[in-house]
């Protein structure tokens, strides 16, 4: 069964949300335990979310579907988490 555009958008939202949770958990652990920042869990979730976003965009193009508020929210959420990830990554060891 092919997922609907709404299901894909929700999958992007949930996966991006998990990436954000992993990012903030990694920051907390690194600060509390004075360890280096481990971002692989966040990175993996971002990759998964981008793959679903690609499926969503392909479906939208193939079926000439409009951009809805849900789709817009999903893409915006993914972009925000990606930006946070990139900022923390760019700060490197000086992030704290």
Image (spheres, rainbow, N blue to C red):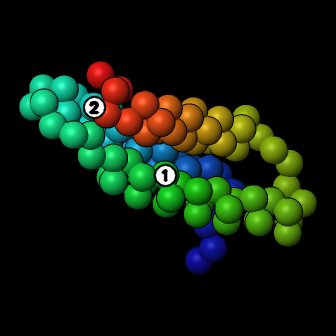
Q: Residue 27's mark?
A: 2
* Res 36 quadrant in image: top left
Nearer the observer, 32 or 75 = 32
Q: Residue at x 50, y 58 (%)?
A: 47
Nearer the observer, 41 or 16 = 41
Q: Residue at x 49, y 60 (%)?
A: 48
Residue 92 point in image, percent of width and height: 38, 36
Which residue is most to the bottom?
A: 1
Residue 1 vertical placement versus 14 (above, below): below
Mark 1 Cα within 10 Å, few/some/many (few <14, many 20+)? many
Helix, strand or loop at disc 1?
helix
Do labels 1 and 2 touch, CB within 8 Å? no
Residue 40 point in image, percent of width and height: 33, 54
Measured Cα–Cα span from mark 1 to mark 2: 16 Å
Residue 42 point in image, percent of width and height: 38, 48
Residue highlighted by disc 1: 46
Left or right side of 18 for 54: right
Q: Residue at x 65, y 35 (%)?
A: 76
Nearer the observer, 39 or 55 = 39
């Amino acid at each position: 069964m092919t997922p609907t555009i709404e299901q894909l958008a929700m999958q992007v939202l949930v996966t991006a949300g998990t990436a954000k949770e992993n990012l903030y958990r990694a920051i907390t652990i690194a600060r509390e335990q004075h360890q280096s920042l481990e971002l692989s869990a966040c990175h993996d979730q971002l990759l998964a979310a981008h793959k679903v976003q690609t499926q969503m965009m392909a479906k939208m193009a193939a079926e000439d579907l409009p951009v809805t508020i849900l789709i817009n929210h999903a893409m915006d959420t993914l972009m925000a988490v990606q930006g946070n990830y990139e900022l923390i990554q760019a700060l490197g060891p000086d992030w704290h």
